[in-house]
Image: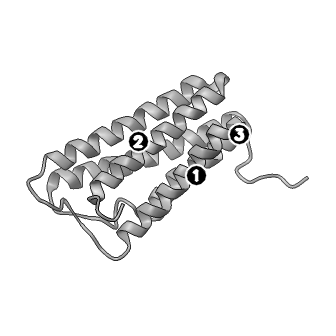
């Protein structure tokens, strides 16, 4: 991870999120189309990042700072942990929605798309589009929570 360019890590993270949502689609057959659609959109995000990576002449299309790798590592580690859990245990639609909301929100709250300074207009546009898509995913997830009458916080018995 230390040697990989930041945009490569962004791409990898989007693919991991896509994989997690694909597992949810498999594990929650009643909501397969919901999770498959989100998984496909995350895979498309990875393609956008890859295209942005290759559309710039700059060796470092994103300027690093002291926080950038730590933020990506934090989100990536959480996603990988959730992939492991989803593979090995049952997961409810509510649990999957809560996890997805945590991931999508962490991308925004950690300012993943703002904290990185793109060195090209192409990469700036890609990061801006990803930020907008992340906000849209949060809205989709919140609407699904509401539609299913799920509480955001776990209810104490």
Residue corresponding to mark 3: 89
- Going 61% across and 48% down the picture, which residue do you hit? 99
Report x, y in % for residue 145: 66, 40
Residue corresponding to mark 2: 15
Q: Residues within 10 Å of mark 2 (few under 14, many from 20)?
A: many
Q: Secondary structure at mark 2?
A: helix
Drawn side of residue 157 relative to residue 102, left or right? right
Between disc 2 and disc 3, the foreground one is: 3
Query: Which numbered disc covers residue 151?
Result: none
Report x, y in % for residue 118: 21, 61
Q: Residues within 10 Å of mark 1 (few under 14, many from 20)?
A: few
Q: Residues within 10 Å of mark 3 (few under 14, many from 20)?
A: few
Q: Earlier in the sequence, mark 1 or mark 3?
A: 1
Q: Secondary structure at mark 3?
A: loop
Residue corresponding to mark 1: 81
Above or below for 100 versus 156: above
From this viewpoint, which residue is outermost toward the bottom? 66
- Going 82% across and 52% down the picture, which residue do you hit? 155
Q: Secondary structure at mark 1?
A: helix
Q: Quadrant of residue 119?
A: bottom left
Above or below for 103 versus 93: below
Q: Earlier in the sequence, mark 2 or mark 3?
A: 2
Q: Earlier in the sequence, mark 1 or mark 2?
A: 2
Q: CA distance from mark 1 to mark 3?
A: 12 Å
Q: CA distance from mark 1 to mark 2?
A: 14 Å
- Going 33% across and 42% down the picture, which residue do you hit? 46
């Amino acid at each position: 991870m230390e040697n990989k360019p930041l945009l490569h890590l962004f791409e990898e993270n989007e693919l991991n999120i896509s994989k997690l949502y694909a597992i949810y689609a498999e594990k929650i057959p009643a909501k397969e189309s919901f999770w498959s659609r989100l998984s496909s959109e995350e895979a498309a995000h990875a393609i956008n990042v890859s295209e942005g990576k290759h559309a710039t002449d700059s060796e470092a299309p994103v300027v690093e700072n002291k926080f950038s790798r730590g933020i990506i590592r934090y989100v990536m580690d959480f996603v990988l942990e959730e992939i492991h859990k989803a593979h090995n245990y049952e997961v409810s639609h509510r649990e999957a929605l809560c996890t997805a909301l945590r991931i999508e929100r962490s991308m925004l709250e950690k300012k993943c798309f703002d904290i990185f300074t793109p060195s090209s207009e192409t990469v700036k546009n890609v990061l801006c589009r990803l930020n907008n898509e992340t906000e849209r995913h949060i809205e989709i997830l919140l609407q699904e929570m509401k539609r299913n009458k799920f509480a955001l916080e776990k209810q104490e018995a």
